[in-house]
Image (cartoon, rainbow, N blue to C red):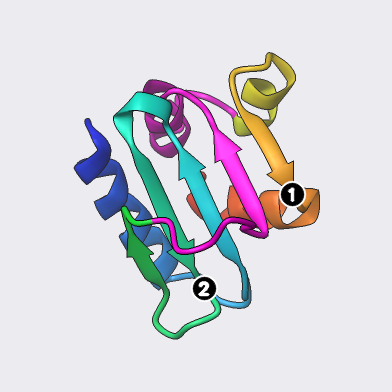
Amino acid sequence: MGIETVTQKIKEKMSLAGGLDATIVLDFKDDGQIFIDTTQSPAVISHVVETDEPDLKLSCKIETFEDILSGKQDPNIAFMMGKLKIKGSMGLAMKLNSIIED
């Protein structure tokens, strides 16, 4: 898929979501990052991280996140297996989970 495809899928899913009011960083290490700012309407999604302290930071391999987006990987299982790392609000992570899962 790649980071551009993941970014496009995130944009589609976030356009249907509301009520998050948070800053989120998706960190794919060498494959890049996606910054999501839902404090603005519509949500701002870019590859430039605009904060040092996001409300939520998810770190994983881009392949793991692609599998989560496609429904091949349950994000809860990925977290328990250590494939997905969460820093910040667990409640926000659960809300995001319901938005990004297919």
Dot 2 crowding, Cα within 10 Å, few <14, some 14–19, many 20+:
many
Element assignment for label 1: strand
* Residue shown at the point (55%, 79%) measured from the top left: 39
* Residue shown at the point (51%, 50%) measured from the top left: 25
Locate residue 77 relative to residue 34 in the image: left or right: right
Q: Amino acid at mark 1?
A: Gly
- In the picture of the structure, the residue carrying the numbered disc 2 is 38
Residue 88, numbered circle: 1
| The quarter of the displayed image where residue 29 is located | top left
Q: Nearer the viewer, residue 96 or 24?
A: 24
Q: Residue furthest top?
A: 81
**Residue 38 drawn at (x, y percent):** 52, 73
Dot 1 crowding, Cα within 10 Å, few <14, some 14–19, many 20+:
some
Examine the rendering and report whether any part of residue 69 can be seen.
yes
The question of residue 17 being in magenta is answered with no
The magenta segment is: 49-74
Q: Quadrant of the N terminus?
A: top left
**Residue 76 drawn at (x, y percent):** 69, 30
| The quarter of the displayed image where residue 72 is located | top left
